[in-house]
Amino acid sequence: MSDKRTEKTEQTPIPATKIIAQNQEVSKQGFPVNMKLALLLGLISFIVYANTLKNGYTLDDYYAITNNNIVTKGMSAIPELLFTPYHRGNFIATNDLYRPLSLVMFAAEYQLFGNNPAPAHFLNVLLFICSVILLFLFFDKLFERKKTAVAFIAALLFAVHPIHTEVVANIKSRDELLCFSFAFLSLNIFLKYVNTGKVVQLFAGTFCFFLSLLSKETVITFLAVIPLIFFFYRNENKKRSAYITISIITAAVIFLAIRFSVLNSYNANSIEKINVINNSLAKEGLSSVSRIATAILILGYYLKLLFVPYPLICDYGFNAISYVTFSNPGVLISLAFYIFLAIFSVKLFLKNHKNPFAFGIFFFLITVSLFSNIPFLIGTAMGERLLFFPSAGFCFLIALMMERVAGRTNESNLSIIKNKKILGMLIPVMLVFIVITINRNSEWLNNYTLYTTDIKSSPQSGKLNLWLGLELITNIEKEEKDTSKQKEIRNEGIDYLRKSIAIYPDIPIAHAGLCDAYFRMGQYDSAEVHGIKAISLDPNSVLTLKNLGGIYFIKKDYTKAIEMSRKQIKLKTDSADPYANIAACFLSLGKVDSGIYYLNESILVDPTYNRSFEFLSMAYKSIGKTDSSKKYEAIAQKMNPGFKL
């Protein structure tokens, strides 16, 4: 009887849940080893990124948070953010994005903590810890806890890899962190659903995938990754795999429909020409051969950064990467490597549909393909943040190679980590990566440290020269109290802005910055030249319209000054300054009634704007209304004790 039972057991496949239970290593206290490893990964991740907590706002943090007039409303703006294009709170774009989830978080944080970057950096680190742990748990579950050591090494490499510094240190990249966390949370839940068949888990996994889409649309590549996982690597139940696939496709369709509706309602859904300053591959006249060759070279740069993550640069815009053709050795090497990866992975897959190496390569190729700029151009030529998803596949492949070196590919426990060969490879790489990561985090302290560091590695970058120039003349100069040093800083900033224009002449913000700098220096002719150029490139530049209004007022061209200020009012209705400027023009023309009218309008817009009261006191004095003049003079003096009529 017992023999028959044994025979029957051998013929019946063991359920995946039992395999997991059998392979689960438990400590004496009953705490699972994989949970201990997850906590260890979380601790390492925190240690590596702890020094970001002292950093300020950098790069796109300003347009996503501090300068976003919707986000700064706080939690009351959350309903608005859910149905508003991504950039709408900062500027109007006709080809905008829809990523509401990170903005909702920023609004809540602004409500709770105000203009304080420290809590936001802490949440970024916390989300990165979640990303690392969820990645480990996914790899561990995917191969039914038979490759726990590989999963741990992969997640460990992911945790310390310097390529992720941009995502963690730049608060704005919360969208990437949320996208990744929800994507891998959905995968972990779907793996449970495959084993249990509980419908609630199917819905939970689908909801998490939908949240990932709301965070950042680039997770759309998982429409290929998820069927690959559940029809080939975890295919115990084809019906459940089909349900998962149908569910994520449905979620994607719903997201795309909402996205289209929101963007279309704001006329922000048009296909616009990509700005070449952001993506050099969009340059007019660039041959398709050179564009594709350069794109392939960039794919090679991605591989280089995964193996050797140095130097790291915050922007790879125009002129940071030179155009090449297929005669370039780097292009040929990159092309050959990617072709090899594709062919090798297909061969492995055809031989064994559950080959982990094939999965790692497929995951990397699928997720990186979206950023290749080959089938279609994206908003940037290259970006370190774009490797956040693909690097997971890369780290998994490196872990598998280490396992192969150890020669113990069938072990389910963690003993292979103690292998001297693995430790000899892992420890040096870990130490180097940790040092680079911590150092790079410190370079993200603020814009000035970031730009001055990165421009040394990429001196011909149009955007880095632009950003450093603007930082010098708009922020660093104001912080300096010594007037002679202020002048030096301003001149240095002007030099960087002029270099950015020499690299790419049609950068509107560079001309706007020069217009502002020259205006404050009293060089009105130079200011006017760059102001006119800036407006021709970007008619919606409020700062330039303001400066041109001031320039024309000084030159006594009151008609043009009024024209500039009226355009400014159309773009920014909540500013009293253009009303006061128009009033000053009318007062100079002797049209006192019109001047007083616009001064009263400026007070309605902003009752705290002292210039309006100063001008009103002067206007009423000029027409002999002494009582009114004294009334507004008194108000002006309360606001500005130094004012004297």
Image (cartoon, rainbow, N blue to C red):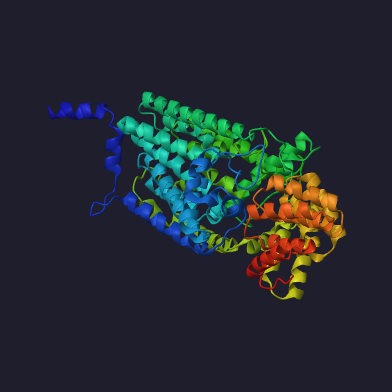
Q: Is residue 63 left or right of residue 10?
A: right
Q: Name the residue at 21% across, 26% down.
A: 8
Q: Name the residue at 52% across, 41% down.
A: 80
Q: Position of residue 126 (x, y in %)?
A: 44, 54
Query: Hey, which residue is sitting farthest left in the picture?
Result: 1
Quadrant for the N terminus in the image:
top left
Q: Is residue 229 visible to the viewer in this orientation of the structure?
A: yes
Q: Position of residue 16 (x, y in %)?
A: 31, 34
Q: Position of residue 290 (x, y in %)?
A: 76, 38
Q: Is residue 443 left or right of residue 625?
A: left
Q: Nearer the viewer, residue 612 or 257?
A: 612
Indicate whether 590 appears above or below 142: below
Indicate whether 28 appears above or below 629: above
Q: Is residue 460 visible to the viewer in this orientation of the structure?
A: no
Quadrant for the C terminus in the image:
bottom right
Q: Nearer the viewer, residue 121 or 476?
A: 476
Q: Nearer the viewer, residue 620 or 467?
A: 620
Q: Nearer the viewer, residue 380 or 59?
A: 59
Image label count: 0
Q: Name the residue at 57% across, 64% down.
A: 442
Q: Is residue 470 left or right of residue 20?
A: right
Q: Name the residue at 29% across, 48% down.
A: 25
Q: Is residue 179 left or right of residue 374?
A: left
Q: Position of residue 231 (x, y in %)?
A: 43, 28
